[in-house]
Image: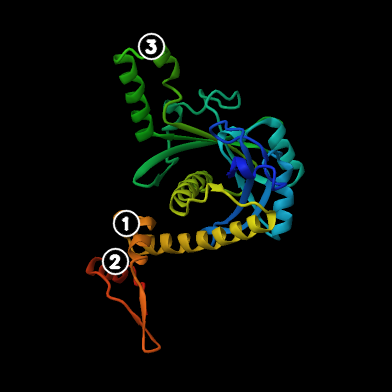
């Protein structure tokens, strides 16, 4: 995750170097790496790296410093390259990396819809059924996991045909028929040998949910830009944000566990909590009055306030 450094402070912190993010913004920034625990369902370790470092080797040192073991890199499509996965294998890193749909490793004839839907090779995920197959990359220990999501397929076909109907530039019925075999598909390359297709798929989808939470955290904590002027102060600011992130995840899991996440966001819960105040009377602290809606929400998630 790249965090921007305010231009006025760009020369005051050594870690702040010109880099780029998803918006191709080359402003001074630093990179914040997190290790996420699947057991705890929360980030457990972080490391700051200069904004101009994007090399795979930074992962090895980060894991070594954390003391973690059994780490698996779950990356985005932009991470894939033969050089990157080759370096991961040299460093004994396990990985789960989605491939772009035009990747030459994907065999659409072997994993086409007609060939795919021939047995019981499907599982359910978030109220939808996912068809799957897998095959080895010749001459390697790498496996391609191929998935077909019919709901996603129908959505992508509808979106493409809608663009043809509205005469959007670059869309045609001829191109639709050429692309229709890729709609609704996800291909993932991995070196993991003892994982089922369902486990690989869930691991990949978990990464996407983590990104969603991080994006929400940036909005709630306003932690996507720093105005710190000294590296020691920056380290303290990052640590405080790390603690806040732990609490964010704790509140998030409370909402999930008590089945309130569809009705309330963490931001909603924090807005209720910040209205709870204490008043000091004759040397004794007393909780101030709480509005009924806040009391009801706290009761629903079993979060007592003394």
- Name the side, left or right, on which 101 lies relative to 47: left
- Name the side, left or right, on which 277 lies relative to 215: left
Q: Position of residue 302 (x, y in %)?
A: 34, 72
Q: Nearer the viewer, mark 3 or mark 2?
A: 2
- Name the side, left or right, on which 228 lies relative to 292: right
| Disc 1 crowd, CA 10 A, few/some/many (<14, 14-19, 20+) | some
- For the point 36% across and 89% down, the residue is 282
Q: What distance separates the C-alpha of mark 3 from that of mark 1?
A: 42 Å
Q: Which residue is mark 2?
A: 297
- Find numbered disc 2 in the image and state the secondary structure of the residue it sits on: helix
Q: What distance separates the C-alpha of mark 1 from that of mark 2?
A: 9 Å
Quadrant in which the C terminus is drawn: bottom left
- For the point 32% across and 25% down, the residue is 158
- For the point 31% across and 53% down, the residue is 262
Q: Nearer the viewer, residue 78 or 237?
A: 237
Q: Earlier in the sequence, mark 1 or mark 2?
A: 1
Q: Which residue is mark 1?
A: 264
- Name the side, left or right, on which 301 lies relative to 237: left
Q: Nearer the viewer, residue 116 or 59?
A: 59
| Disc 3 crowd, CA 10 A, few/some/many (<14, 14-19, 20+) | some
Q: What distance separates the C-alpha of mark 3 from that of mark 2?
A: 51 Å
Q: Position of residue 150 (x, y in %)?
A: 37, 33
Q: Which mark is residue 172?
A: 3
Position of residue 102 relative to residue 258, above or below, is: above
Q: Position of residue 46 (x, y in %)?
A: 63, 55
């Amino acid at each position: 995750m790249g965090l921007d450094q305010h231009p006025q402070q760009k020369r005051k912190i050594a870690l702040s170097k010109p880099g780029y993010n998803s918006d191709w913004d080359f402003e001074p920034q630093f990179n914040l790496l997190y290790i996420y625990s699947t057991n705890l369902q929360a980030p457990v370790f972080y490391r700051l790296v200069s904004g101009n470092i994007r090399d795979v080797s930074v992962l090895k040192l980060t894991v070594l410093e954390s003391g973690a073991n059994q780490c698996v890199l779950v990356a985005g499509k932009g991470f894939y390259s033969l050089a990157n996965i080759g370096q991961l294998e040299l460093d004994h890193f396990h990985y789960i990396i989605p491939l772009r749909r035009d990747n030459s490793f994907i065999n659409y004839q072997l994993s086409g819809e007609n060939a795919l839907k021939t047995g019981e090779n499907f599982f359910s995920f978030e109220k939808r059924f996912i068809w799957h197959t897998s095959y080895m990359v010749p001459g390697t220990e790498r496996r391609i996991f191929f998935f077909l999501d019919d709901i996603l397929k129908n959505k992508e076909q509808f979106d493409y045909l809608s663009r043809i109907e509205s005469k959007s530039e670059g869309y045609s019925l001829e191109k639709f028929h050429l692309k229709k075999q890729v709609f609704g598909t996800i291909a993932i390359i991995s070196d993991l040998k003892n994982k089922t297709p369902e486990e690989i798929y869930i691991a990949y989808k978990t990464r996407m949910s983590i990104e969603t939470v991080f994006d929400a955290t940036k909005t709630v904590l306003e932690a996507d830009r720093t105005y710190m002027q000294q590296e020691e102060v920056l380290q303290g600011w990052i640590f405080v944000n790390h603690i806040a992130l732990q609490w964010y995840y704790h509140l998030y899991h409370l909402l999930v566990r008590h089945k309130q996440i569809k009705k309330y966001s963490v931001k909603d819960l924090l807005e209720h909590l910040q209205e709870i105040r204490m008043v000091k009377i004759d040397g004794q602290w007393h909780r101030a009055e709480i509005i009924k809606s806040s009391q009801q929400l706290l009761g629903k998630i079993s979060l007592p306030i003394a």
